Structures are given as structure tokens and as C-alpha cells.
Amino acid sequence: MPELTIRLLETPEDIAAVEKLQGLVWPGSEIEIVPAHVLLTVIHNGGLVIGAFLDGELVGFVFGFPGLEFVPDGPHPKHCSHMMGVHPDHRSRGIGYALKRAQWQMVRHQGLNHVTWTYDPLLSRNAHLNISRLGAVCNFYHRSEYGELRDGLNAGLPTDRFQVDWWINSQRVVRRMGDRARRGFGLDHFLQAGVQALYPVQTGPGGLPRPPEHFTPPGDRLALAEIPSDFHDLKAKDFPLARDWRFFGREVFESIFAAGYLVTDFVFERGGDAPRSFYVLTHGEATLDQ
């Protein structure tokens, strides 16, 4: 296997390769590609564009820029991580994690403590990376965050997003960024501890998971919320069902966040007839450093 190289991207030639890679990661609409002149402006003003290379070929990138968040005691600086993409032929090889680990190191060097970004809460692969592996947490749900996107992955659905908080100097994150991989908990661990799923998910025609009509808000300190394990596949096979999941997920997460819960972990269960995916919800902020 070729050795993965991670480095900062700073030249027009590097950024032209990022432009091209965006078209492969999010096909179908050139208008959604972030142009080279914007990326170069980000680089020249404190932002970071980081690339992953195999045999000299750019196969992944992440970019972000300094921003401000407004809290009760005034504006605070943060890093806004806006986009990360990995070539479709090189996914599930740890490239996304390697890019985020490099970003973690460089943002810490800039003296910042907080990184935020958004992602589709129904994408199991992204949830596993962002929540379980990186240690980000979430209690912000944004409806239609980007309006209508026309690329092949987002077209036709409201662009609802989680906004995650990555407290990069916390023990929670530092442990996950260490050389020894964190051993995650499986579904059985939570079930044996008495943690209950908020709702049942039934399998419909074609083996696709269907959301229930309603759900019961959590009453315990911990709860599980299930999402489809492969939302892109579900959307391709049954678009109306994908819309049902979007609006059901909106109802669930807006309700639980309003009740004081956070997303603090993610479980991907491979056993049984089909993979299953669950967010772990924790009431209160006492576990943010766990």
C-alpha cells in the first residue's frame, strides 16, 4: 500500500488539484465547487488547506479558516472547518482521520481551542468519524443550512445539518488523537447497561429501514437514536423514504437538543442481518471531557 503523505497546500498548482478533486467528491454541479481564488485567499489570511497524497496524487483535502463565535462575554476566535473530501476510490482507508489529525495539530499551533463544522446527521460514515473517532460533540441542529444544493449528493433534500463542537485541547479529543486508537463501545455495551433506543426502526420493502410515525422523548440520562446505516444508498433506491427520514430526524434532534441532550458518541453495529447505526445521547454537559 502506498504511503500516505499529509502536507499544507499553498501554491496555485496545489489548489488547482483541490478544485478538480471537489468535482469527483461532489459530482453534478460545478457551481458548488469552491474556486481556487477563494481557497488561496483563505490560505493568505490565516486559513488552512491540507492535502493527502498517495504516490503524488491528491486523494483528499480539508480546509477551514479563522472565525468568530459570539458568546455572553463577547466574541471569541475559533476555526471554522468548512469542507473535507476524499476521492471516491480511496475512502474507508483512514484518510479523513489523518487529515483531521493534521488540522488538529495545526489549529492548536495557532493558539485556538475550538473548531466547528457541519455535516448531514443522517450520514453514518461521517457520524462515525466526527463523533466517535474525533470526539466532537453536538447540540445544534440547523434546518436547511445551505439552502438548495445541486450536486449529486445533496440535490432534492433540505440541507439540514448538525453543527459540531470540537474542543481540541480537551482530554476527550486529545485521547482520540493519540497514537493508540480508542476502543469504542458496541451496541451490546449500551443495551447491557440499560440504555434504550428512543424508537423502533422497522425494515420495509427492499430491506430499507423505515422511520416510525412518532417517538418518545428520552427520560434517562443516556439514550440511543438510530439512523440509516447507508443513507446515500437508501436515497438512491427510495427517494420519498429519504425525505421521510430527513423530516423525522429533524423532529427527533430538535426535540432532544431542546431538552438538554448532546450527541456524545456514535455506534456502528455490523452484526445481524444488516448494519445498524446509533447516536448516543447524553443529558447535560458533564461528560464533554469523557
Image (cartoon, rainbow, N blue to C red):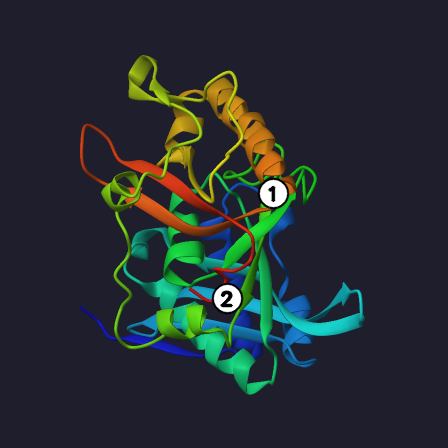
Question: Does the rendering let one see residue 154?
Answer: yes
**Front in this rendered view, residue 26 or 214:** 214
Residue lying furthest top: 205
Disc 2, SS: strand
Q: Toward which corner of the image does residue 69 lie, by quadrant?
A: bottom right
Task: Report the quarter where the N terminus lies.
Answer: bottom left
Q: Is residue 101 above or below residue 290?
A: below
Task: Please give the residue where the numbered disc 2 appears in the rendered image.
Answer: 62
195 left or right, relative to 113: left
Front residue (pair 185, 176): 185
Label 1 or label 2, whichever lies nearer to me, is 1
Determine the secondary structure under disc 1.
helix
Q: Is residue 156 visible?
A: no
The crowd level at tag 2 (other Cα within 10 Å; few <14, some 14-19, many 20+) is many
Residue at image location 50% in from the left, 35% down from the top:
219
Q: Which residue type carries mark 1?
A: Phe
Of pointers 1 and 2, the one earlier in the residue sequence? 2
Determine the CA span between mark 1 and mark 2: 28 Å
Mark number, residue 257:
1
Residue ID at (55%, 59%): 83
Residue 252 percent coordinates (x, y): 55, 32
